[in-house]
Amino acid sequence: MKMFSKVKSLGIFGLSTFEVTVECDISNGLPRFDVVGLPDAVVKESRERVRASIKNCHLDFPVSRITVNIAPADIKKEGALYDLPVLISILKATSQLKGNTDSYAFIGELSLDGEIRKVNGVLPMLIEAKNKGIESVFIPYENALEGSVVEGINALPVKNIFEVMQHISGENEISPAKSNVTDENEAFYDVDFSDVRGQSEAKRALEIAAAGGHNCLMIGPPGSGKSMLAKRIPTILPDMTFEEKLETTKVYSIAGVIPTGQAIISRRPFRSPHHTISAQALTGGGASPKPGEISLAHNGVIFMDEFPEFDRRAKESMRQPLEDGTVSIARTAGSVSYPSNIMLIAAMNPCPCGYYGHPTKECHCTEAAKRRYLDKISGPILDRIDIHIEVAPVEYDQLSGKGNEEKSADIKARVNKARAIQQKRFQGTNVSCNAKMTPEMTKSYCVLSKEANELLKASFEKLGLSARAYDKILRIARTIADLDDAHNIELSHVAEALQYRSLDRKYWINQ
């Protein structure tokens, strides 16, 4: 007796997906069940889940030598998503499954009674299946909304193995998952910039940051409203394009954190990790590298409150993502890259007690304590943060006043107008906003008037700015000019941009 079968599945490593073929050979010999093809421990355990599922569903488990190969054999296979294709290959080899499976692929984890459980990474795997010309993919029912996002392929949500068998045999066909993603276009927030009293200078700086995608550092005493301001930044950012939603959802799919009942991530992420987070949790990693907080903030905001208190390795690990927009993780099994097109918003006190420079409260920190506190932030990291602003304490009259503060919608309208100018400017490139301009683009698009150039030259020499700081000032000035709908960068635009690069000279002058 010799029986053979072959079914399709998919695999994932990092953001890379690949087609998988699950082959089953059943032959005479002592009863044995082997899974080969570079499986990890979870895949090897599929033998027991598959065996129990077949028996508990009152199907026949062959008492023979069973060899299952998950090809290609040179790529490590991880996770429980191969349970379903392994089971289908056995049923097909033993002729218990009637019907042609050539146009199908299978993804799913099995419970011991034949139920099919949710798996991570369904969205990128379905995109790969579509690119490979696979017509239909069986996916767990709990992944139905996520799977429905991909057009041009039938995502068939199933709850148990009987539904799979009945569909293939033609007894009871399953309808492909459908989702109207356009219903999720509008992002609603329960916070608004009008909640923040005063702080007009900080609001202006954050408007510029949102308009150009610039990173921002807020320095101010406790209770001045730094966290409150940061949490409202997503309310003034432009709505996500469908491509941005898809990119972000792919990362969330791999991490397994798509909110229940949601087909796609429809509003910009806002991640706020605690300052005790490790460098690995921030950038991603593990034996099987998963996205970290930086990648989960892709196309959105990562807010790092109490910035100096973060572990130094964690802060320094931000360098590459802030510069390149990607996180690269190297492991023995291979290297993976996750996207990290993020806005970093950092907040900190000016000293350990928080009251250095406060108009009414006295600072009790020694000079040495202040220096140690500020030295926790390195020059290279500080240089990668475009805008530095001071958030002053709010006066009583501002808090108790009845004046109407500007709403997020009004600020967002100006941000959208500036972003529309940038989209037109960078059309046909991978650059989405001024903060991401290449040096060549900066040279081409940041044309200074004569007065603006003279001011920047004098400031560069006086302040001893680095080449990176010079580029960042030009990009900030370009964003301010866009908000003013100005073609060239004028004196006032450079003057305002320089204000946002002066705090490092005030606090870190002796560093």
Image (cartoon, grey):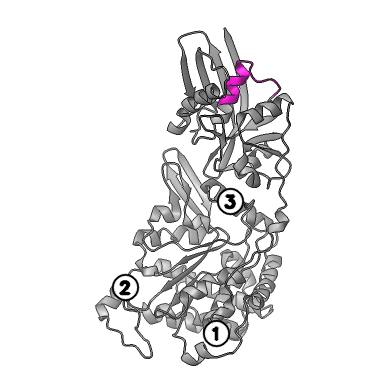
Magenta region includes residue 93: yes
- Residue 262 x, y percent position in the rendering: 62, 52
Q: Give the range drawn in magenta.
A: 87-100
Looking at the rendered structure, the kind of residue marked 1 is Ser
The residue carrying mark 2 is 373
Q: How far apart are marks 1 and 2 (CA)?
A: 28 Å
Disc 1 designates what residue?
A: 200
Q: Which of 304 and 409 is in front in this view?
A: 409
Q: What is the crowding at mark 1: few (fewer than 14 residues within 10 Å), some, or many (at least 20)?
A: few
Q: In this view, does 253 lie above or below 84?
A: below
Q: Which amino acid does label 3 sit on?
A: Thr
Q: Is mark 2 on a helix, strand or loop?
A: helix
- In the figure, residue 207 lies in which quadrant? bottom right
For residue 255, which numbered disc appears in the image? none
Q: Camera-side residue: 268 or 62?
A: 62
Query: Does any portion of residue 133 appear in the rendered image?
Result: no
User: Reading the chain from its start, which is encountered first: label 1 or label 2?
Assistant: 1
Q: In this view, does 386 lie above or below 141?
A: below
Residue to which mark 3 is pinned: 260
- Residue at image position (61%, 36%) is 159
Badge 2 crowding class, 10 Å Cα cut-off, few under 14, some 14 to 19, many 20 or more, is: some
First in residue order: circle 2 vs circle 3:
3
